[in-house]
Amino acid sequence: MSRLRKRHSVRFSPQSAFSRPLANVFAFLWLALAAWPLGIETGFGQVPAETSLEGEVQVLAVDERDDAGHWRHRLEYFLQTETKRVRLEMMETPGQLPRPNARIRVSGVRVGNDLRVSQMSILDSLPRSFYPAAQANVTTGSQPTLVALLNFRDLTVQPFTTGEIQNRVVLNPDSTDRFLRENSYGKLWLDVDVLDWKTMGISYTEIGGGCSVNSDKLLEEALKILGPSVNLHDYSRLILVFPHLPLGGLCGLGSVGTWTIQTPLEGEWTASVAWIDGDCAVSSTVAHEFGHNLGFGHASSLAGLGENILDPSHPFGAWNEYGDGADTMGTSSSFLHFSSVRKAQARWLSETNVMNVTSSGDYVLEQLEQPSGGVKALTIPVGVNGSGNPVGYWIDYRKPAGAFATSDAVQIRLFSDSFFDCTDNSPHSVRFTSLELPGAIKGRVTNSEGSGIPGVSVRCYDSAWNPLGLTSTDITGDYLLAGIRPGTAYVGTSNTLGYVDEFYQDARDLSTATPATVTSGTVTSSIDFKLNLGASVSGRITRDADGTGISDVVVNVYDSAGYWVAASGSNRAGWYSVANVPEGNVYLRVTNNQGYIDEYYDNALSLNSATPVGVTAGMDTTVNFQLTIGGSVSGRVVRDSDGQGVPNIEVSAANSQFYESATTDVTGQYTVRGLPGGLYYVGTFHDGDLVDEYFDNSPASATATLVTVALGAQTSNINFSLGLGGTVSGRVIRDSDGQGIAGIYVDIYDSSWRYLTSPNGFLGILHGQGGLARHWFCRDSQSARLQG
């Protein structure tokens, strides 16, 4: 019988039996051991204590992407007292942070629902053993799990069905449940109910954004919905899935272990909680957050240790918190087995599966992925760190097997409950991912007179603009970039001292820079910079209607060749100042997202008609802007099959003089602002499988309906209903021998020779004379024919 109280749910309980044939696969390993003491210094920050609370520590793991697209992790701490739940702002250093579920007493300053902790005493904590203990009932057996699909009162979209969630969590061959079964050797499985979409009593805009999504508020509102619908005490796992969360780059959050939760209707309830952004609601993401629910930290990596793997503090080493690609607790997209560290922590490996090694010799490891009673992991204790936590190596043998194992190697990791974490005590494991020693780059930054410039940032990138390293010049102007992977690197400066930044050698941007060659284990020297003193441009940006200053307008400066060189934003009164501008003629352009018309100086819509501004090194030049409120175009983009709004569609408005665009929100709504008055072609553009079009339902600009825009007015209801496009596939071969040819673009035209698309899905729009024009690709000149 279902545990759900309503009928808007589906329950399923797959078989818990699990078995796989044992593979007689062994790895032989000779070990030479050495002792290695670790140390981490700790200290307390002091603030006046105004209140004292006692309760259970609850830890939330947050997994998100930063603006550069890199994964980052942080922990949030809460204290559950008998009557309330308070967020803790921990002032302590990593060694003194409390463990999940510990009972503590804290004192500090209360600010709203936050407590800024100044003093803490641990009343009861988990044992600090080298072989981490686990509660068997939490990490083995059936896991009664409730998956709740929840949206907001102003965001009622339902991007997937209960059936799709069932497939991802339980039924698919690569589901979360099957992943956990295979990892645990059949010792753990999910028993899942899915609650169909319900609308919470809060709006999408009430739950925060940036780096402060209100997980407390989400859980509180979810419990109000769940209480009347289900018996929460029937579950020990709660997975909340939302159509979208406003935290940039967020994929998921997970409680570290289980929490004691005060519910509105059913009193105290113990369960783990995961919050999943619908954009990332795939099996591997759920598995990663469920790993946090099991008490797992991240699978990190330390690359470039050379021959001495016993010294992870080597200055050339490169740390990556999510870097272990052979463990789902590292990069969840790889969706591979947990390492032996985690399997032992969860008690999926027995004590006979883990051998503690204290002497050199030959040892036999059985394959980690297959169930057996032999040795699957070697542990080598090497001391304790400054927090008193044991540190040791874990070695296991990985080989492809089942649906979630593709690694084929002996893997070495380092593990400690608070090792190598400068921000929290999340228990990471560290895998040595490369034995190639990185290199380093050094040089000197001077002024035009040859004197060293201290305090200049020196940055290093690869050819795709991925950052490789960052440092600053010392008092003599010298710098050292350590831990740079071998290969080609581009080095540039960044400063706020009034000098014109550049890339090596004397280049304005990466495309014209001279690369530095980095060699393993060596230092590339004499990557020097001589920076010239720059000019500055300042002024005020106001509304032309009344002279009021406009804040948050970006002023971009371009050199005489049209290359961007510097930028700055206006303050609350409209004043701005751009420094580090190269001497000579420059062009200024202002951009904004407030509905004003972007322009070049002086009242020009394009660079060709802009007025150049002459600037002199060491001098400031005043340039003011008066901006006009433009017109706007708004509407909604929907799928023609079901009328649902389509997010992330770019909508462009263009004519021969101007171009502007906007992106649809989660409901499909858009508004293109800041348009000069006139007639515009309006069209959609995206990388998906819907067919883009011009307004009104036209495949080309020649047949499009022009949209009239007036200054200060909005032209609304410029709507689009996009249909699913068809596909054409085939093979391109050489006619001489029938061999396939890679890298050939295949263009598709309609009967009037209008260009439609190409196999990579790219269908672009450019503004130019006569309206919107299609992008064209260069064709290969080889003789080929289309087959099939």
Image (cartoon, rainbow, N blue to C red):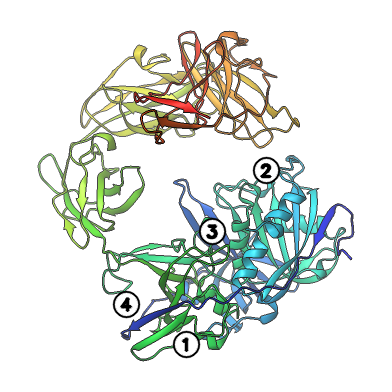
Q: Secondary structure at mark 1?
A: strand
Q: Which residue bears the numbered disc 1?
A: 355
Q: Which residue bears the numbered disc 2?
A: 205
Q: Is residue 440 above or below residue 542?
A: below
Q: Residue 592: x, y in percent?
A: 49, 28
Q: Earlier in the sequence, mark 2 or mark 1?
A: 2
Q: CA distance from mark 1 to mark 3?
A: 28 Å
Q: Earlier in the sequence, mark 1 or mark 3?
A: 3
**Left/right of residue 169 with respect to residue 183 in the rendered view:** right
Name the amino acid type tagged 1.
Met
Q: Residue furthest left?
A: 449
> Which mark is nearer the camera, 3 or 4?
3
Which residue is rendered at x = 62% and y = 19% of the image? 633
> Which mark is nearer the camera, 4 or 1?
1
Which residue is rendered at x = 59% and y = 58% of the image? 284
Q: Is residue 427 above or below residue 403?
A: below
Q: Secondary structure at mark 3?
A: helix
Q: Which residue bears the numbered disc 3?
A: 332
Q: Is residue 102 above or below residue 732?
A: below
Q: Nearer the viewer, residue 137 or 185?
A: 185
**Left/right of residue 485 with respect to residue 191 in the rendered view:** left
Q: Residue furthest front?
A: 737
Q: CA distance from mark 3 to mark 2?
A: 28 Å
**Left/right of residue 741 with respect to residue 655 in the rendered view:** left
Name the amino acid type tagged 2.
Thr
Name the amino acid type tagged 4.
Leu
Label 4 CA crowd tier, 10 Å (few <14, some 14–19, many 20+): some
Q: Residue 704: x, y in percent?
A: 60, 11
Q: Residue 21: x, y in percent?
A: 60, 74
Q: Which residue bears the numbered disc 4?
A: 310
Q: Quadrant of the N terminus?
A: bottom right
